[in-house]
Image (cartoon, rainbow, N blue to C red):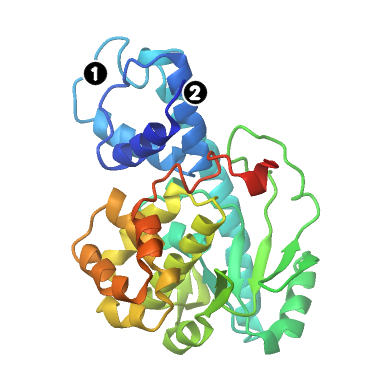
């Protein structure tokens, strides 16, 4: 029986220290590892890490990542395929976002991209390293009528209206065509948020004021855009990751995002003091477990007095498997 906790932990280890040649695992182990990589959104990133690592050692006949077939000699074909298709999907979504940003700028309607649409373009040397399911943007509620007119002119239809966001999509972007990879024709939509907020344990954590008050006019993907300050983006990543931890569908790529952004955040302790500690501590615990960064352990220590001992014990025991979709939970699986 495959140990999925080990499998998820191994994914995180490979991001930092990928093997120069594929391990001699049985197909059952490889199958579980590939599944976990897809669930956690890191298959394209792992291919880039693998390629970088394998380039540092002399090739071994039949034993490298680029051999034929599967197994120890050719496992790299699957990882390269994941990266290649994700590159096409990211290029399509980035093109769509640039079009949206130009259209909103032309009418002086403020719109601020958040989450994956910004992270792929700014935190990663290669945008194709990070999958993008959708495009997320902040649009002040008073500008929604103008925003809806712009989206309609660009061919988008509103498909959902909810507490957290509205969704817009174009016809032809709503049907799954490939369940094995991040295909550019798989469904995607624009999630338009009136506020930057998450619901954590029944409480609403709202960062809207901080995001807009610290944002600046800049460019993204060659288009005019409002850009969030790193500190506001970091807080948003923390509460968004914690939200998904609570839902048991968190992903390793969210922790990788935090690992890349955390080092550039200035004076993080006062930022955390502004928020309910329950909204940030779980994400910080996972970050500290898998990608230790100077100062994060101290940040967690400063938050603990504001939490119950039971919450701290629970959060400190989190691992990638326990918080992800691979972990069966009764409320989701009908148990």
Answer with left or right where residue 132 lies relative to residue 299.
right
Residue 240, x across and y down, in percent: 50, 65
Does 262 appear above or below 92?
Answer: below
Question: Residue, x 81% and y 54% (percent of image)?
Answer: 171
Between 309 and 16, the one lying in front of the other is 309
Does 226 appear above or below 113?
Answer: below
Residue 150, x across and y down, in percent: 74, 76
Residue 217, x across and y down, in percent: 46, 83
Does 179 appear above or below 251?
Answer: above
Judged by depth in the image, the label closer to the viewer, 1 or 2, is 2
Q: Residues within 10 Å of mark 2 (few under 14, many from 20)?
A: few
**Residue hosting label 2:** 31
Q: Residues within 10 Å of mark 1 (few under 14, many from 20)?
A: some
Viewer can see residue 286: yes
Answer with left or right where residue 188 lies relative to residue 120.
right
SS at badge 2: helix
Label 2 near label 1: C-beta < 8 Å? no
Residue 274, x across and y down, in percent: 39, 84
**Residue hosting label 1:** 59
Answer with left or right where residue 302 lies relative to residue 243.
left
């Amino acid at each position: 029986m495959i140990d999925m906790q080990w499998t998820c932990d191994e994914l995180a280890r490979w991001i930092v220290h990928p093997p120069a040649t594929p391990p001699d695992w049985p197909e059952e182990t490889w199958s579980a590892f590939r599944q976990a990589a897809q669930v956690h959104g890191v298959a394209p990133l792992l291919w880039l890490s693998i390629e970088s690592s394998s380039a540092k050692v002399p090739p071994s006949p039949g034993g490298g990542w680029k051999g034929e077939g599967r197994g120890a000699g050719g496992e790299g074909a699957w990882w390269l395929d994941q990266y290649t298709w994700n590159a096409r999907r990211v290029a399509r979504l980035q093109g769509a976002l640039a079009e949206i940003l130009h259209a909103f700028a032309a009418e002086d309607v403020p719109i601020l991209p958040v989450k994956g649409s910004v992270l792929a373009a700014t935190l990663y040397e290669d945008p194709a390293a990070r999958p993008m399911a959708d495009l997320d943007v902040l649009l002040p509620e008073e500008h929604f009528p103008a925003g809806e007119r712009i989206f309609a002119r660009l061919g988008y239809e509103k498909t959902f209206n909810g507490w957290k966001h509205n969704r817009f999509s174009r016809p032809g972007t709503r049907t799954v065509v490939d369940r094995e990879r991040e295909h550019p024709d798989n469904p995607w939509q624009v999630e338009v948020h009136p506020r930057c907020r998450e619901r954590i344990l029944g409480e609403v954590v709202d960062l809207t004021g901080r995001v807009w008050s610290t944002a600046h006019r800049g460019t993204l993907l060659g288009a005019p855009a409002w850009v969030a300050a790193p500190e506001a983006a970091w807080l948003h990543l923390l509460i968004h990751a914690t939200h998904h931890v609570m839902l048991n569908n968190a992903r390793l790529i969210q922790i990788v995002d935090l690992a890349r952004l955390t080092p550039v955040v200035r004076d993080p302790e006062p930022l955390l003091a502004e928020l309910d500690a329950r909204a940030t501590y779980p994400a910080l615990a996972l970050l500290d477990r898998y990608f230790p960064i100077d100062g994060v352990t101290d940040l967690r220590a400063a938050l603990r007095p504001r939490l119950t001992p039971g919450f701290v014990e629970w959060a400190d025991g989190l691992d990638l498997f326990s918080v992800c979709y691979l972990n069966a939970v009764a409320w989701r699986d009908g148990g």
